Image (cartoon, helix red, strand yellow):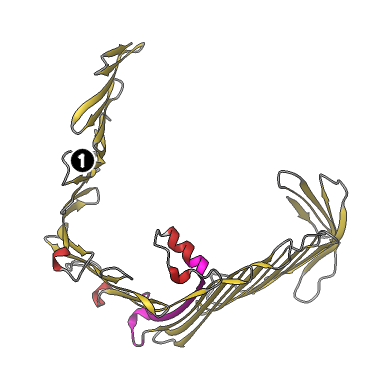
């Protein structure tokens, strides 16, 4: 693409190919008298031709622009028509900003009814997006009917600037071949008299309603490997979800834990309930986490995590989880001891019923261990460990893949050894030794093969 202009003339040349033919366009426009909000204007001709036909078609080209505004109008008979109109005030990062854009494109070729349209507008005041509207559509080339359409709307207003209270409404609609795929509608209201709204936290309650096609819901269930739902058997039907989301994310951990509650219902049944509470670590106060979940056709689940601080760099964490919180005997425990003297030294040792986790990283000494041992099976581990000498660059590293381990020992400019073990028994060893600048010896065991 080449485009250039001066005070009297605007010219352009573009080439586009789809692998079968190349479409070339040439623009030749002269300066015209701008009107209204525009301070520069060019009008002239545009010629389109393809490599197959070699015959060009001439059309009109009209472009104008000014400060915060631009307009383009292109039309080539029996080929294409494009219209673009944009205006904005302020800058995107400013506290106040307004923008409006419209784009239309049509294919005018015989037997081709394809088209595209887009319209968008945005209003920003005092750093808050009050109104955002985005709408687009694409039509089928053969039928001229809409094959895809989107409509997104956001409306927000501050009800009290001193307390930061607001109301927000979001609507989203996605259609495919005139059939609604997803229709989302939500209303959010901030919590009254909550300091999180004034600083940088979030406290709000959102109620939402989702309508989606049965086909889309079934495909989503297949992707998630869920069983087929007979209630979604009608391909032209829709399913409705409604629910409530409550968020309270604190601006200061000293004011209490972050909380989130989700209540999702399908067809006023098959409810999903999630309740999360998270207190982050600060000063001498430990971290804790609580999670409760109720899913359709499953036992309730729970997760609990508590810490005991022993010092500023050492603590013990206890994780308790259950896939059936109605049965106390179903609860499992995972206990971890964590020690972090500095940013380059970390040690974590965790023990559970089925696994044991080891993490030991010392960057100053060049040591690193990260692996999981399976308690029920001897010599089964997944992960790695390695040591590299910071001065000599000697390396001793092992990769664990359950029953097999791969160890490599390297002495720079001297030797390298690879050892493979299964269930702790050596099954292969490859030793490479540099005898001098002209001779390298490689030995394979237990095959007893020696190469020079």
Q: Is residue 452 left or right of residue 60?
A: left
Query: Residue 39 appears at what percent x and percent y?
Result: 77, 70
Query: Residue 240 appears at what percent x and percent y?
Result: 47, 77
Q: Is residue 393 left or right of residue 27?
A: left
Q: Is residue 31 left or right of residue 161?
A: right
429 or 447, nearer to the observer:
447
Look at 15% across and 59% down and name the residue there: 315
Q: Quadrant of residue 161?
A: bottom left
Query: Residue 72 appears at what percent x and percent y?
Result: 76, 66
Question: What residue is pinned by disc 1?
Answer: 380
Look at 88% across and 49% down and name the residue there: 55
Q: Residues within 10 Å of mark 1 (few under 14, many from 20)?
A: some
Judge whether residue 193 is colored magenta: yes
- From the viewer's perspective, is residue 107 above or below residue 96? above
Considering the numbered disc 1 on the image, is that residue within a helix, a strand or a loop?
Answer: loop
Q: Quadrant of residue 235?
A: bottom right
| Quadrant for the C terminus in the image | top left
Look at 21% across and 49% down and name the residue there: 346
- From the viewer's perspective, is residue 209 above or below residue 381? below
- From the viewer's perspective, is residue 218 above or below residue 372? below
Judge whether residue 437 is colored magenta: no
Look at 17% across and 43% down and name the residue there: 377
Instruction: State which region is magenta.
Output: 192-217
- Looking at the image, can residue 199 be seen? no
Q: Is residue 305 left or right of residue 35?
A: left
């Amino acid at each position: 693409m080449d485009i250039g202009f001066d005070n009297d003339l605007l010219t352009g040349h573009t080439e586009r190919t789809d692998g079968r033919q190349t479409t070339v366009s040439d623009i030749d426009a002269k300066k015209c008298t701008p009107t209204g909000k525009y301070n520069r204007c060019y009008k002239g001709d545009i010629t389109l031709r393809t490599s197959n036909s070699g015959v060009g078609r001439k059309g009109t080209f009209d472009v104008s622009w000014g400060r915060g505004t631009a307009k383009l109008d292109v039309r080539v008979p029996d080929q294409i028509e494009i219209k673009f109109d944009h205006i904005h005030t302020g800058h995107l990062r400013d506290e106040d900003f307004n923008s409006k854009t419209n784009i239309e494109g049509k294919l005018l070729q015989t037997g081709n009814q394809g088209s595209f349209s887009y319209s968008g507008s945005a209003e920003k005041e005092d750093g808050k997006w009050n109104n955002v509207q985005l709408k687009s559509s694409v039509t089928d080339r053969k039928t001229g009917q809409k094959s895809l359409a989107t409509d997104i709307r956001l409306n927000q207003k501050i009800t009290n600037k001193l307390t930061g209270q607001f109301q927000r409404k979001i609507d989203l609609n996605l259609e495919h071949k005139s059939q609604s795929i997803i229709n989302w509608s939500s209303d959010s209201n901030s919590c009254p008299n909550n300091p999180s709204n004034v600083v940088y936290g979030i406290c709000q309650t959102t109620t939402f309603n989702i309508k989606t096609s049965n086909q889309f819901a079934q495909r989503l269930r297949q992707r998630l490997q869920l069983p087929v739902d007979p209630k979604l058997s009608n391909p032209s039907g829709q399913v409705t979800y409604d629910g409530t989301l409550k968020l309270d994310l604190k601006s200061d951990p000293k004011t209490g834990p972050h909380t989130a509650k989700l209540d999702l219902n399908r067809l006023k049944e098959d409810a999903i309930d999630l309740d999360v509470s998270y207190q982050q670590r600060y000063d001498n106060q430990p971290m804790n986490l609580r999670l409760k979940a109720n899913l359709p056709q499953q036992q309730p689940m729970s997760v609990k995590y508590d810490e005991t601080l022993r010092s500023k760099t050492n603590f013990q964490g206890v994780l308790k989880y259950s896939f059936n919180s109605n049965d106390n005997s179903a609860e499992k425990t995972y206990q971890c001891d964590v020690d972090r003297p500095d940013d380059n030294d970390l040690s974590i040792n965790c023990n559970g019923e089925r696994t044991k986790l080891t993490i030991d990283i010392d960057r100053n000494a060049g040591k690193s261990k990260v692996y999981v041992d399976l308690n029920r099976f001897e010599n089964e581990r997944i992960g790695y460990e390695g040591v590299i000498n910071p001065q000599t660059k000697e390396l001793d590293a092992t990769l664990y893949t359950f029953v097999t381990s791969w160890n490599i020992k390297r002495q720079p400019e001297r030797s390298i050894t690879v050892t493979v073990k299964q269930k702790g028994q050596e099954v292969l060893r490859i030793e490479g030794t540099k005898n001098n600048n002209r001779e390298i010896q490689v030995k394979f065991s237990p095959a007893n093969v020696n190469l020079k």
